[in-house]
Image (cartoon, coloured by chain):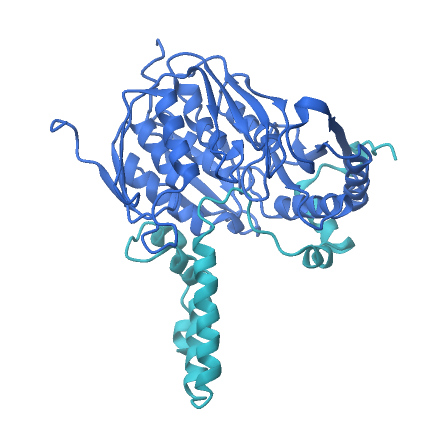
Amino acid sequence: MSNRPKPLVFEGAKNFRLRLILSTLSGKPIKITKIRPDDQHVGIRDEEASFLRLLSRVTNGAHIQVGQTGTSVIYYPGIITGGERIHPCATTSSKPVGYYLEPLLYIAPFSKEKFSIKLQGITASKEDAGVEAIRLGLLPIMEKFGIRDPSLHILKRGSPPNGGGEVHFLVDSTALQPLTMHAIDIPKISAIRGVAYCTRVSPSIVNRMIDAARNVLRPIGVEVDITADVWRGENAGKSPGFGLTLVAESKKGWNFFAEDIGGAGEVPEDIGTKVAYELIEEISKAGVVGRSQLSLALVYMVLGKEDIGRLRINKEQIDEDLIYLLRDIKTIFGTEIYLKEVDDDDSGDFIATVKGTNFLNPNKKM
Amino acid sequence: LQGSVQRKWDISKMLYLNNIEPADVIKRWKQEDIEEEEDESSTESNVGSDEEEDDDDFFKKKTDSIVESKEDKFIPDYPSIDELKEKWNEDTLKKLQSRFFVSAKKIINDND
């Protein structure tokens, strides 16, 4: 233990999962302190503890030490092994499987064996990534960086609050490192696709969502194709629910998405209209990638070979969360991402420029 | 203060200044801090309505703590549906189309 390097220190619960992921990728230990010391429920939450268990499942040799009060975590990363795993997500938390799955997208391509994991729990929520958002919005980002055929199969849908869903995330072939990205042109959207789903409610609900979304999107004049996905019986989880995910697709493979699920007092028309408008809003605030896709794209760029990668970002994407991310990347990988305003048009966009750290998957044969 | 209005912060230089909180970086970049300074100076001159101001501060602090609870939120914040409806009218949608969408000629309409 004494030979181990001194951990890098972070404060607060912000970026909890991402810091652990960056630590895993870099092999550098971290210590997170002052995790909600003044909160009513001091320290790490159930979902964070469950995420730590998940990390130890998909890695080998990790050492995790949670302080007695739960306000500090010391994490010595292990080797990403992947393999076939099952993870029941914390039932005491309202976090969906997407909360656990999203960080895995950063590490799954760099595992020793194929990465095949089944996650059980709620499959969509109002705040965290839904499985459709990951499948339609984040897996294409992985593919743009050269990760071959990542897939996410929904075996059972589980609406909140009781869940009962199950998804299977699979990255069959491991990668040596992500491709260097040069994406400085705004992608042009050629179609809007989506999935409207429901569990344990009348199938007419999905059609009501689809009609409402189409009414909003019609003036844009692009092809709109929304699939109705009705779940019944055992595979429909334990709670009634419905939701909509819309994706604006470009021919170059970039896409933007918006999603929501029906909450208390909301009717299907509300969700259809809301998600359609939110997609339009998201498109207006997007660069090459949308706001929820940016961190994955930037981390992959950092992991790329020692070459300069460029990604166009919208000024609306420069927010507090991005700065936290960039600072965490610098602390762990020692590399800075530069932002330079685009000067050949009046868009106000920026080009994020980063020199890759030449991360090499230690498990991949050259 | 008039001179300070002319400041234009370079975001790329402020990104990694650890002595400035990320929220303050954004504020400075968007020059919101200057507006706040101006607000503060104008409220200082209106001494007398202390009780109301205290209430305002109280609710402001409460809001901050709510923001803190949104750590690691995946889905970004959007304006309300009414604001979005108002924002995305025919004209604004046309502007968006020219920047983000392929020519309408190439598009097949969805079957109604």
Report whether B78 appears left or right of A119: right
Q: Residue furthest bottom?
A: B48
Q: Is residue A67 left or right of residue A81?
A: left
Q: Is A114 drawn above or below residue B93 in the view shown?
A: above
Q: At which x and y percent is residue B38?
A: 44, 77
Determine the residue located farthest toward the top in the rendered image: A365
- Locate the N terminus of chain A by quadrant: top left
**Which residue lies at the image location 75% right of the left edge and 32% below the top edge?**
A226
Say which quarter of the image contains residue A47. Answer: top left
Image-quadrant location for residue A114: top left
Q: Position of residue A298 (x, y in %)?
A: 43, 35
> Which residue does the image show at 73% across and 25% down from the upper left?
A232
Figure disc tally? 0
What letter labels the chain drawn in blue? A
* Front-lying residue, A215 or A88: A88
In the displayed structure, B61 sits above or below A150; it is below
Image quadrant where residue A198 sits:
top right
Image x and y of residue A193, in percent:
71, 32
- Work out whether A329 lies above or below A165: below
Closer to us: B5 or A286: A286
Q: Name the quadrant of the C terminus of chain A.
A: top left
| Chain letter for the part of the structure drawn in cyan | B
